[in-house]
Image: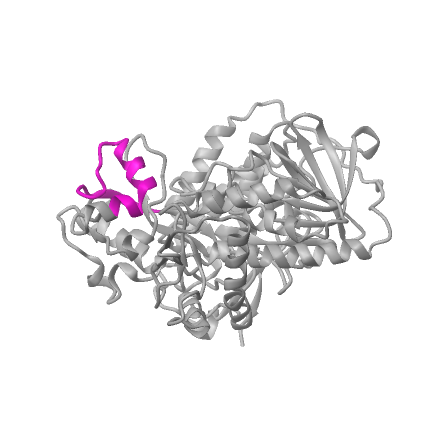
Amino acid sequence: MPTITPRYLVPFHPKRLPHWHTDVLVIGAGVAGLRAASAVDPSLSVVVVTKDVLELSNSSWAQGGIAGVMDPEDRFENHIADTLAAGGALCDPAVVAEVVREAPERIGELIDWGTAFDEHAGALVLGREGGHSHHRIVHALGDATGREVMRAMIERTRQLGNAQVWSRCFTLDLLTHDGSCRGALVRDERHGMMLVWAKQTILATGGAGQLYRESTNPSVATGDGHALAFRAGVPLRDMEFVQFHPTVLYIAGSSRNLITEAIRGEGGRLVDRHGHRFMPDYDPRGELAPRDVVSQAIESQMERTRHACVYLDMSHLDPAFTRRRFPGIAAMCAKFGLDIARDRIPVRPGAHYMIGGVIVDHDGRTSVPGLWAAGEVTSTGLHGANRLASNSLLEGLVYGARSGQGASAAAAASNSLAPALPLENVPRTEPDEPLDLADIRNSLKSLLWRTAGVRREQAALVDAVETVDTWSRYVFQRQFANADGWELQNMLTVARVLLRAALAREESRGVHLRTDFPQTDDKRWLGHLVYQRQPDGRLADPVFQRRT
Protein backbone atom coordinates (compact mmCIF):
# COMPACT_ATOMS: atom_id res chain seq x y z
CA MET A 1 0.00 0.00 0.00
CA PRO A 2 1.58 3.31 -1.07
CA THR A 3 2.08 6.14 1.39
CA ILE A 4 0.11 9.21 0.30
CA THR A 5 1.12 12.61 1.63
CA PRO A 6 -2.00 14.85 1.68
CA ARG A 7 -1.81 18.21 -0.11
CA TYR A 8 -3.34 20.05 2.87
CA LEU A 9 -3.27 18.90 6.48
CA VAL A 10 -6.73 20.13 7.52
CA PRO A 11 -10.13 20.76 5.89
CA PHE A 12 -11.02 24.36 5.05
CA HIS A 13 -13.25 26.44 2.81
CA PRO A 14 -12.64 30.16 2.04
CA LYS A 15 -16.26 31.11 2.76
CA ARG A 16 -15.99 29.78 6.29
CA LEU A 17 -12.70 31.34 7.37
CA PRO A 18 -11.49 34.91 8.02
CA HIS A 19 -9.11 36.39 5.45
CA TRP A 20 -6.09 38.67 5.73
CA HIS A 21 -4.31 40.39 2.86
CA THR A 22 -0.71 41.55 2.78
CA ASP A 23 1.88 42.39 0.15
CA VAL A 24 4.58 40.13 1.58
CA LEU A 25 4.16 37.25 4.00
CA VAL A 26 7.27 36.06 5.88
CA ILE A 27 6.95 32.65 7.55
CA GLY A 28 9.56 32.39 10.30
CA ALA A 29 11.19 34.98 12.52
CA GLY A 30 14.82 33.98 12.89
CA VAL A 31 17.71 35.89 11.35
CA ALA A 32 16.65 35.06 7.77
CA GLY A 33 12.99 35.98 8.26
CA LEU A 34 13.60 39.25 10.07
CA ARG A 35 16.31 40.27 7.60
CA ALA A 36 13.86 39.57 4.78
CA ALA A 37 11.18 41.71 6.42
CA SER A 38 13.66 44.60 6.74
CA ALA A 39 14.42 44.41 3.03
CA VAL A 40 10.82 44.98 1.94
CA ASP A 41 10.00 48.45 0.65
CA PRO A 42 8.44 50.57 3.44
CA SER A 43 5.48 51.34 1.17
CA LEU A 44 4.48 47.64 1.17
CA SER A 45 2.77 45.74 3.96
CA VAL A 46 4.54 42.82 5.63
CA VAL A 47 3.23 40.15 7.96
CA VAL A 48 5.80 38.01 9.83
CA VAL A 49 4.38 34.85 11.41
CA THR A 50 6.22 32.68 13.93
CA LYS A 51 4.81 29.64 15.66
CA ASP A 52 6.20 30.61 19.06
CA VAL A 53 7.61 33.81 20.55
CA LEU A 54 10.09 35.92 18.59
CA GLU A 55 12.97 35.02 20.85
CA LEU A 56 12.68 31.24 20.29
CA SER A 57 14.51 30.23 17.12
CA ASN A 58 17.66 28.40 16.08
CA SER A 59 19.17 31.82 15.40
CA SER A 60 18.74 32.84 19.02
CA TRP A 61 20.47 29.67 20.19
CA ALA A 62 23.58 30.20 18.03
CA GLN A 63 26.65 30.53 20.22
CA GLY A 64 29.71 30.71 18.00
CA GLY A 65 29.26 33.70 15.72
CA ILE A 66 29.25 34.91 12.14
CA ALA A 67 32.09 34.19 9.75
CA GLY A 68 33.43 37.07 7.67
CA VAL A 69 36.70 38.46 6.36
CA MET A 70 37.19 41.38 8.75
CA ASP A 71 40.95 41.11 9.37
CA PRO A 72 43.39 42.78 6.91
CA GLU A 73 45.56 39.66 7.11
CA ASP A 74 42.66 37.49 5.94
CA ARG A 75 41.32 37.37 2.37
CA PHE A 76 38.05 36.47 0.69
CA GLU A 77 39.89 33.72 -1.18
CA ASN A 78 40.83 32.08 2.14
CA HIS A 79 37.22 32.01 3.40
CA ILE A 80 36.05 30.72 0.02
CA ALA A 81 38.69 27.97 0.02
CA ASP A 82 37.81 26.91 3.58
CA THR A 83 34.09 26.69 2.71
CA LEU A 84 34.74 24.67 -0.43
CA ALA A 85 37.11 22.32 1.42
CA ALA A 86 34.50 21.60 4.08
CA GLY A 87 31.71 21.07 1.54
CA GLY A 88 32.78 17.71 0.17
CA ALA A 89 32.95 18.95 -3.45
CA LEU A 90 29.21 19.70 -3.53
CA CYS A 91 29.30 23.46 -2.89
CA ASP A 92 28.33 25.83 -5.68
CA PRO A 93 31.54 27.88 -6.07
CA ALA A 94 29.68 30.92 -7.43
CA VAL A 95 27.31 30.95 -4.44
CA VAL A 96 30.20 30.53 -2.01
CA ALA A 97 32.08 33.46 -3.54
CA GLU A 98 29.03 35.71 -3.50
CA VAL A 99 28.12 34.98 0.12
CA VAL A 100 31.68 35.30 1.42
CA ARG A 101 32.20 38.63 -0.34
CA GLU A 102 28.92 39.94 1.04
CA ALA A 103 29.77 39.01 4.64
CA PRO A 104 31.49 42.25 5.74
CA GLU A 105 28.54 44.31 4.50
CA ARG A 106 26.01 42.18 6.38
CA ILE A 107 28.08 42.22 9.58
CA GLY A 108 28.48 45.99 9.28
CA GLU A 109 24.73 46.27 8.86
CA LEU A 110 24.16 44.44 12.15
CA ILE A 111 26.57 46.79 13.89
CA ASP A 112 24.69 49.77 12.48
CA TRP A 113 21.46 48.27 13.86
CA GLY A 114 22.92 48.09 17.34
CA THR A 115 24.41 44.61 17.61
CA ALA A 116 27.13 44.72 20.25
CA PHE A 117 29.81 42.35 18.98
CA ASP A 118 32.71 41.71 21.33
CA GLU A 119 35.51 44.24 20.96
CA HIS A 120 38.95 44.93 22.42
CA ALA A 121 40.53 48.37 22.25
CA GLY A 122 37.87 49.46 19.77
CA ALA A 123 38.41 46.58 17.34
CA LEU A 124 36.27 43.50 16.78
CA VAL A 125 37.51 40.38 18.53
CA LEU A 126 37.75 37.63 15.91
CA GLY A 127 37.58 33.97 16.90
CA ARG A 128 38.59 30.86 15.02
CA GLU A 129 36.62 27.64 14.66
CA GLY A 130 37.04 24.23 13.06
CA GLY A 131 37.79 24.28 9.35
CA HIS A 132 38.75 27.98 9.27
CA SER A 133 42.31 28.91 8.31
CA HIS A 134 42.11 32.35 9.96
CA HIS A 135 40.50 34.17 12.86
CA ARG A 136 37.33 35.56 11.26
CA ILE A 137 34.38 34.79 13.58
CA VAL A 138 32.68 37.84 15.09
CA HIS A 139 30.88 36.96 18.31
CA ALA A 140 28.87 38.67 21.03
CA LEU A 141 28.50 38.27 24.79
CA GLY A 142 31.27 35.70 24.64
CA ASP A 143 29.15 32.71 23.67
CA ALA A 144 25.69 34.16 22.98
CA THR A 145 26.02 35.67 19.52
CA GLY A 146 22.63 34.53 18.29
CA ARG A 147 20.83 36.03 21.26
CA GLU A 148 22.48 39.42 20.78
CA VAL A 149 21.97 39.46 17.00
CA MET A 150 18.32 38.55 17.43
CA ARG A 151 17.85 41.20 20.11
CA ALA A 152 19.03 43.88 17.71
CA MET A 153 17.03 42.50 14.78
CA ILE A 154 13.83 42.13 16.81
CA GLU A 155 14.18 45.73 17.97
CA ARG A 156 14.66 46.90 14.38
CA THR A 157 11.69 44.85 13.14
CA ARG A 158 9.44 46.37 15.78
CA GLN A 159 10.40 49.81 14.53
CA LEU A 160 9.32 49.04 10.96
CA GLY A 161 6.14 50.95 10.24
CA ASN A 162 4.99 48.52 7.56
CA ALA A 163 5.45 45.22 9.39
CA GLN A 164 3.28 43.23 11.77
CA VAL A 165 4.61 40.28 13.75
CA TRP A 166 2.18 37.51 14.66
CA SER A 167 3.61 35.34 17.44
CA ARG A 168 2.22 31.92 18.37
CA CYS A 169 0.84 31.53 14.85
CA PHE A 170 1.21 28.08 13.29
CA THR A 171 1.54 27.87 9.51
CA LEU A 172 -0.17 24.70 8.32
CA ASP A 173 0.26 24.95 4.58
CA LEU A 174 1.11 27.18 1.67
CA LEU A 175 -1.87 28.16 -0.48
CA THR A 176 -1.27 27.45 -4.16
CA HIS A 177 -3.43 28.08 -7.20
CA ASP A 178 -2.59 27.62 -10.89
CA GLY A 179 0.95 26.64 -9.88
CA SER A 180 1.68 29.82 -7.89
CA CYS A 181 1.93 30.49 -4.18
CA ARG A 182 -0.79 32.86 -2.98
CA GLY A 183 -0.11 32.92 0.78
CA ALA A 184 -0.69 30.49 3.61
CA LEU A 185 -3.23 28.79 5.83
CA VAL A 186 -2.39 29.67 9.45
CA ARG A 187 -3.83 29.08 12.89
CA ASP A 188 -3.53 32.21 15.01
CA GLU A 189 -3.73 31.86 18.80
CA ARG A 190 -6.31 34.64 19.03
CA HIS A 191 -8.35 34.34 15.82
CA GLY A 192 -8.17 30.64 15.01
CA MET A 193 -7.76 29.39 11.45
CA MET A 194 -7.13 32.09 8.83
CA LEU A 195 -6.28 32.44 5.16
CA VAL A 196 -3.44 34.92 4.68
CA TRP A 197 -3.31 36.03 1.06
CA ALA A 198 -0.01 37.52 -0.08
CA LYS A 199 1.43 38.77 -3.34
CA GLN A 200 4.72 37.15 -2.38
CA THR A 201 5.61 34.68 0.37
CA ILE A 202 9.03 34.09 1.97
CA LEU A 203 9.74 30.82 3.74
CA ALA A 204 12.26 31.17 6.59
CA THR A 205 11.22 28.46 9.04
CA GLY A 206 14.62 27.12 10.07
CA GLY A 207 15.69 23.52 10.55
CA ALA A 208 14.57 20.08 11.65
CA GLY A 209 16.84 19.05 14.53
CA GLN A 210 13.89 17.79 16.56
CA LEU A 211 13.76 14.78 14.24
CA TYR A 212 16.56 13.40 16.41
CA ARG A 213 16.65 12.30 20.03
CA GLU A 214 19.95 14.17 20.54
CA SER A 215 19.80 17.71 19.18
CA THR A 216 20.99 21.24 19.87
CA ASN A 217 17.81 22.69 18.35
CA PRO A 218 14.91 24.27 20.24
CA SER A 219 11.56 22.50 20.39
CA VAL A 220 10.18 24.51 17.43
CA ALA A 221 12.66 23.01 14.92
CA THR A 222 10.37 20.29 13.56
CA GLY A 223 10.96 20.73 9.81
CA ASP A 224 7.65 22.53 9.22
CA GLY A 225 8.95 24.63 6.34
CA HIS A 226 10.53 21.68 4.56
CA ALA A 227 7.25 19.76 4.87
CA LEU A 228 4.82 22.45 3.76
CA ALA A 229 7.06 23.35 0.81
CA PHE A 230 7.18 19.66 -0.14
CA ARG A 231 3.37 19.39 0.02
CA ALA A 232 3.15 22.45 -2.24
CA GLY A 233 5.29 20.71 -4.87
CA VAL A 234 8.66 22.35 -4.18
CA PRO A 235 11.64 20.01 -4.69
CA LEU A 236 13.92 19.22 -1.73
CA ARG A 237 17.64 18.66 -2.30
CA ASP A 238 20.51 17.13 -0.27
CA MET A 239 18.24 15.94 2.53
CA GLU A 240 20.68 13.18 3.53
CA PHE A 241 23.15 15.81 4.73
CA VAL A 242 22.42 16.54 8.39
CA GLN A 243 25.21 18.16 10.34
CA PHE A 244 25.89 16.82 13.81
CA HIS A 245 27.60 19.18 16.19
CA PRO A 246 30.44 17.30 17.90
CA THR A 247 30.04 18.82 21.34
CA VAL A 248 26.64 18.78 23.00
CA LEU A 249 26.44 18.80 26.80
CA TYR A 250 25.64 15.29 27.98
CA ILE A 251 24.40 15.31 31.57
CA ALA A 252 21.44 13.38 32.91
CA GLY A 253 18.64 15.84 33.61
CA SER A 254 20.08 18.55 31.38
CA SER A 255 18.65 19.62 28.07
CA ARG A 256 21.08 18.89 25.25
CA ASN A 257 22.79 22.28 25.25
CA LEU A 258 25.30 23.20 22.58
CA ILE A 259 28.91 23.65 23.70
CA THR A 260 30.24 26.11 21.16
CA GLU A 261 33.02 25.20 18.76
CA ALA A 262 34.76 28.38 19.85
CA ILE A 263 35.94 26.53 22.97
CA ARG A 264 38.08 24.32 20.75
CA GLY A 265 39.07 27.39 18.79
CA GLU A 266 40.45 28.92 21.98
CA GLY A 267 42.47 25.82 22.81
CA GLY A 268 40.01 23.44 24.46
CA ARG A 269 40.94 19.77 24.10
CA LEU A 270 38.86 16.66 23.59
CA VAL A 271 39.80 13.75 25.84
CA ASP A 272 38.26 10.35 26.44
CA ARG A 273 37.29 8.75 29.76
CA HIS A 274 40.96 7.92 30.43
CA GLY A 275 42.14 11.49 29.81
CA HIS A 276 43.69 10.65 26.44
CA ARG A 277 43.61 13.52 23.92
CA PHE A 278 42.40 11.54 20.92
CA MET A 279 41.71 13.98 18.06
CA PRO A 280 45.33 13.99 16.76
CA ASP A 281 44.90 10.22 16.31
CA TYR A 282 42.20 10.90 13.72
CA ASP A 283 43.20 14.14 12.00
CA PRO A 284 46.34 16.34 11.98
CA ARG A 285 44.14 19.39 12.57
CA GLY A 286 43.14 17.93 15.92
CA GLU A 287 40.22 19.69 17.60
CA LEU A 288 40.06 22.21 14.74
CA ALA A 289 39.12 19.64 12.12
CA PRO A 290 35.70 20.19 10.47
CA ARG A 291 32.62 19.12 12.39
CA ASP A 292 31.99 15.93 10.45
CA VAL A 293 35.51 14.69 11.18
CA VAL A 294 35.27 15.55 14.89
CA SER A 295 31.79 14.01 15.28
CA GLN A 296 32.88 10.78 13.63
CA ALA A 297 36.05 10.65 15.73
CA ILE A 298 34.04 11.12 18.93
CA GLU A 299 31.69 8.29 17.96
CA SER A 300 34.68 6.02 17.30
CA GLN A 301 36.36 6.93 20.58
CA MET A 302 33.15 6.38 22.56
CA GLU A 303 32.94 2.93 20.97
CA ARG A 304 36.59 2.12 21.72
CA THR A 305 36.32 3.16 25.35
CA ARG A 306 32.79 1.77 25.82
CA HIS A 307 31.71 5.07 27.30
CA ALA A 308 28.62 7.22 26.63
CA CYS A 309 30.55 10.45 26.02
CA VAL A 310 33.91 12.16 25.74
CA TYR A 311 35.04 15.31 27.53
CA LEU A 312 36.09 18.89 26.76
CA ASP A 313 39.06 19.92 28.86
CA MET A 314 40.05 23.57 29.40
CA SER A 315 41.97 23.13 32.63
CA HIS A 316 45.25 24.03 30.89
CA LEU A 317 43.92 27.48 29.88
CA ASP A 318 43.86 30.64 32.00
CA PRO A 319 40.81 30.23 34.28
CA ALA A 320 39.89 33.93 34.27
CA PHE A 321 39.98 34.03 30.46
CA THR A 322 37.92 30.86 30.16
CA ARG A 323 35.15 32.10 32.43
CA ARG A 324 35.14 35.55 30.83
CA ARG A 325 35.13 34.24 27.25
CA PHE A 326 32.34 31.68 27.83
CA PRO A 327 30.05 33.11 30.52
CA GLY A 328 26.89 31.41 29.28
CA ILE A 329 28.44 27.94 29.18
CA ALA A 330 30.11 28.55 32.56
CA ALA A 331 26.75 29.41 34.12
CA MET A 332 25.00 26.46 32.46
CA CYS A 333 27.60 23.94 33.64
CA ALA A 334 27.70 25.45 37.12
CA LYS A 335 24.08 24.36 37.58
CA PHE A 336 25.40 20.78 37.49
CA GLY A 337 28.38 21.40 39.73
CA LEU A 338 30.92 21.79 36.92
CA ASP A 339 33.54 24.54 36.77
CA ILE A 340 34.51 24.79 33.11
CA ALA A 341 37.94 26.17 34.03
CA ARG A 342 38.80 23.07 36.11
CA ASP A 343 36.41 20.24 35.34
CA ARG A 344 35.99 18.17 32.23
CA ILE A 345 32.70 18.80 30.40
CA PRO A 346 30.90 15.64 29.21
CA VAL A 347 29.92 15.96 25.53
CA ARG A 348 28.77 13.89 22.57
CA PRO A 349 27.42 14.71 19.08
CA GLY A 350 23.87 15.93 18.44
CA ALA A 351 21.83 16.90 15.39
CA HIS A 352 22.57 20.54 14.73
CA TYR A 353 21.91 21.79 11.20
CA MET A 354 19.85 20.63 8.23
CA ILE A 355 22.05 21.23 5.20
CA GLY A 356 19.45 20.08 2.69
CA GLY A 357 16.21 21.83 1.93
CA VAL A 358 14.18 23.87 -0.53
CA ILE A 359 16.09 24.58 -3.73
CA VAL A 360 16.50 28.32 -4.37
CA ASP A 361 18.37 30.37 -6.94
CA HIS A 362 20.93 33.09 -6.18
CA ASP A 363 18.14 35.49 -5.20
CA GLY A 364 16.24 33.07 -2.95
CA ARG A 365 13.54 32.29 -5.52
CA THR A 366 12.01 28.77 -5.47
CA SER A 367 10.57 26.84 -8.41
CA VAL A 368 7.01 27.87 -7.40
CA PRO A 369 6.15 31.42 -8.55
CA GLY A 370 5.40 33.75 -5.66
CA LEU A 371 7.45 31.70 -3.18
CA TRP A 372 10.91 32.61 -1.88
CA ALA A 373 13.01 31.03 0.85
CA ALA A 374 15.99 31.90 3.04
CA GLY A 375 18.03 30.38 5.84
CA GLU A 376 18.24 26.82 7.10
CA VAL A 377 15.09 25.69 5.27
CA THR A 378 16.92 26.16 1.96
CA SER A 379 19.50 24.42 -0.16
CA THR A 380 21.46 27.31 -1.68
CA GLY A 381 24.68 25.57 -2.67
CA LEU A 382 26.72 27.31 0.02
CA HIS A 383 27.29 24.32 2.30
CA GLY A 384 27.61 21.34 -0.04
CA ALA A 385 27.89 18.16 2.01
CA ASN A 386 29.11 19.81 5.21
CA ARG A 387 28.58 23.31 6.58
CA LEU A 388 31.62 25.28 7.67
CA ALA A 389 31.22 26.61 11.21
CA SER A 390 29.58 30.05 11.54
CA ASN A 391 28.50 30.22 7.91
CA SER A 392 24.83 29.65 8.84
CA LEU A 393 23.91 33.03 10.33
CA LEU A 394 25.81 34.57 7.43
CA GLU A 395 23.74 32.63 4.89
CA GLY A 396 20.53 33.65 6.66
CA LEU A 397 21.49 37.32 6.50
CA VAL A 398 22.58 37.22 2.85
CA TYR A 399 19.59 35.27 1.54
CA GLY A 400 17.20 37.02 3.89
CA ALA A 401 18.22 40.31 2.29
CA ARG A 402 18.07 38.90 -1.24
CA SER A 403 14.70 37.18 -0.87
CA GLY A 404 13.25 40.25 0.84
CA GLN A 405 14.43 42.51 -1.95
CA GLY A 406 13.22 40.13 -4.65
CA ALA A 407 9.82 39.58 -3.06
CA SER A 408 9.46 43.32 -2.49
CA ALA A 409 10.11 44.11 -6.14
CA ALA A 410 7.74 41.38 -7.32
CA ALA A 411 4.98 42.51 -4.95
CA ALA A 412 5.38 46.13 -6.03
CA ALA A 413 4.99 45.08 -9.65
CA SER A 414 1.74 43.25 -8.92
CA ASN A 415 -1.48 45.10 -9.72
CA SER A 416 -3.55 43.85 -6.80
CA LEU A 417 -3.58 41.58 -3.81
CA ALA A 418 -4.30 37.93 -4.46
CA PRO A 419 -8.03 37.29 -4.61
CA ALA A 420 -9.71 34.89 -2.25
CA LEU A 421 -9.47 31.97 -4.62
CA PRO A 422 -12.02 29.13 -4.49
CA LEU A 423 -9.77 26.67 -2.70
CA GLU A 424 -11.32 23.83 -0.79
CA ASN A 425 -10.00 20.90 1.19
CA VAL A 426 -12.69 18.50 2.33
CA PRO A 427 -12.68 16.45 5.54
CA ARG A 428 -11.46 12.87 5.33
CA THR A 429 -12.99 9.89 7.04
CA GLU A 430 -10.86 9.12 10.06
CA PRO A 431 -10.41 6.02 12.23
CA ASP A 432 -12.00 6.17 15.67
CA GLU A 433 -8.93 4.80 17.44
CA PRO A 434 -7.00 7.61 19.19
CA LEU A 435 -3.26 7.98 18.64
CA ASP A 436 -0.58 8.55 21.26
CA LEU A 437 1.21 11.32 19.37
CA ALA A 438 3.99 11.69 21.96
CA ASP A 439 4.81 8.00 21.69
CA ILE A 440 5.09 8.13 17.90
CA ARG A 441 7.16 11.29 18.05
CA ASN A 442 9.59 9.87 20.60
CA SER A 443 9.85 6.63 18.64
CA LEU A 444 10.60 8.58 15.46
CA LYS A 445 13.33 10.63 17.15
CA SER A 446 14.97 7.51 18.58
CA LEU A 447 14.71 5.67 15.25
CA LEU A 448 16.42 8.44 13.30
CA TRP A 449 19.14 8.79 15.91
CA ARG A 450 19.91 5.06 15.66
CA THR A 451 19.66 4.69 11.89
CA ALA A 452 20.37 8.07 10.29
CA GLY A 453 22.67 9.65 12.85
CA VAL A 454 26.41 10.17 12.60
CA ARG A 455 26.81 6.64 11.20
CA ARG A 456 24.50 4.91 8.72
CA GLU A 457 24.27 1.54 6.98
CA GLN A 458 21.90 -0.14 4.56
CA ALA A 459 20.06 -2.69 6.70
CA ALA A 460 19.17 -0.16 9.40
CA LEU A 461 18.09 2.43 6.84
CA VAL A 462 15.87 -0.06 5.00
CA ASP A 463 14.19 -0.95 8.27
CA ALA A 464 13.76 2.72 9.16
CA VAL A 465 12.19 3.54 5.79
CA GLU A 466 9.66 0.72 6.20
CA THR A 467 8.87 1.71 9.78
CA VAL A 468 8.35 5.40 9.01
CA ASP A 469 6.21 4.52 5.99
CA THR A 470 4.02 2.35 8.22
CA TRP A 471 3.59 5.14 10.77
CA SER A 472 2.94 7.66 8.01
CA ARG A 473 0.15 5.65 6.43
CA TYR A 474 -2.07 5.83 9.50
CA VAL A 475 -0.90 9.23 10.78
CA PHE A 476 -1.52 10.92 7.40
CA GLN A 477 -5.09 9.59 7.41
CA ARG A 478 -5.86 11.92 10.30
CA GLN A 479 -6.78 15.60 10.22
CA PHE A 480 -5.64 16.99 13.54
CA ALA A 481 -6.84 20.11 15.28
CA ASN A 482 -3.66 21.05 17.13
CA ALA A 483 0.03 21.72 16.64
CA ASP A 484 1.11 18.39 18.16
CA GLY A 485 -0.54 16.50 15.32
CA TRP A 486 0.61 18.89 12.59
CA GLU A 487 4.21 18.83 13.82
CA LEU A 488 4.22 15.03 13.86
CA GLN A 489 2.92 14.93 10.29
CA ASN A 490 5.62 17.41 9.24
CA MET A 491 8.32 15.41 10.99
CA LEU A 492 7.21 12.19 9.29
CA THR A 493 7.16 13.96 5.92
CA VAL A 494 10.73 15.18 6.30
CA ALA A 495 11.94 11.90 7.79
CA ARG A 496 10.65 9.93 4.80
CA VAL A 497 12.72 12.04 2.41
CA LEU A 498 15.78 12.12 4.66
CA LEU A 499 15.88 8.36 5.13
CA ARG A 500 15.41 7.62 1.44
CA ALA A 501 18.18 10.02 0.50
CA ALA A 502 20.52 8.52 3.10
CA LEU A 503 19.74 5.04 1.78
CA ALA A 504 20.17 6.03 -1.86
CA ARG A 505 23.59 7.69 -1.48
CA GLU A 506 25.91 4.69 -1.38
CA GLU A 507 29.09 6.50 -0.42
CA SER A 508 30.47 8.63 2.40
CA ARG A 509 30.73 12.37 1.83
CA GLY A 510 30.83 15.25 4.29
CA VAL A 511 28.38 14.67 7.12
CA HIS A 512 26.95 11.56 5.44
CA LEU A 513 28.91 8.54 6.69
CA ARG A 514 27.84 5.14 5.34
CA THR A 515 29.83 2.50 7.22
CA ASP A 516 29.05 0.02 4.43
CA PHE A 517 30.30 2.50 1.80
CA PRO A 518 33.11 4.30 3.66
CA GLN A 519 34.78 5.84 0.60
CA THR A 520 33.81 8.94 -1.37
CA ASP A 521 32.74 7.90 -4.89
CA ASP A 522 32.91 10.86 -7.27
CA LYS A 523 32.33 8.64 -10.28
CA ARG A 524 28.83 7.69 -9.14
CA TRP A 525 27.83 10.27 -6.53
CA LEU A 526 29.32 13.67 -7.33
CA GLY A 527 25.96 15.39 -7.43
CA HIS A 528 22.69 16.04 -5.63
CA LEU A 529 19.62 13.92 -4.87
CA VAL A 530 16.34 15.79 -5.42
CA TYR A 531 12.97 14.59 -4.13
CA GLN A 532 9.51 15.91 -4.97
CA ARG A 533 5.90 15.08 -4.13
CA GLN A 534 3.86 13.85 -7.08
CA PRO A 535 0.41 15.41 -7.68
CA ASP A 536 -1.26 12.22 -6.39
CA GLY A 537 0.61 12.50 -3.07
CA ARG A 538 3.21 9.81 -3.68
CA LEU A 539 6.93 10.45 -3.20
CA ALA A 540 8.56 10.52 -6.62
CA ASP A 541 11.78 8.64 -7.33
CA PRO A 542 14.82 10.86 -6.78
CA VAL A 543 16.36 12.89 -9.57
CA PHE A 544 20.16 12.90 -9.52
CA GLN A 545 21.70 16.23 -10.53
CA ARG A 546 25.32 15.57 -11.39
CA ARG A 547 27.86 18.31 -10.72
CA THR A 548 30.12 19.14 -13.64
Q: Position of residue 81 (x, y in %)?
A: 42, 72
Numbered range of the magenta stretch:
322-349
296 over 52 or under it: above or below: below
Identify the residue at image location x=86%, y=53%: 415
Residue nearest the observer in this picture, 237 or 467: 237
Instruction: Report the number of numbered marks.
Output: 0
Q: Quadrant of the C terminus?
A: bottom right
Identify the residue at image location x=46%, y=46%: 146
Identify the residue at image location x=41%, y=49%: 140
Judge whether residue 311 can be spotted in this image.
Answer: no
Judge whether residue 139 can be spotted in this image.
Answer: yes
Identify the residue at image location x=55%, y=30%: 484
Looking at the image, what colour scheme do you see? one colour
Q: Position of residue 317 (x, y in %)?
A: 19, 51
Q: Position of residue 54 (x, y in %)?
A: 56, 37
Residue nearest the observer in this picture, 258 or 265: 265
Quarter-of-image position of residue 476: top right
Q: Quadrant of the N terminus?
A: top right
Residue nearest the observer in this picture, 371 or 212: 371
Question: Residue most toward the front?
Answer: 121
Quarter-of-image position of residue 456: bottom left
281 over 371 or under it: above or below: below
Question: Residue most toward the bottom?
Answer: 548
Magenta-drawn stretch contains 455: no
Residue nearest the observer in this picture, 203 or 495: 203
Q: Position of residue 492 (x, y in %)?
A: 54, 41
Magenta-drawn stretch contains 345: yes
Q: Is residue 479 left or right of residue 352?
A: right
200 over 252 or under it: above or below: below
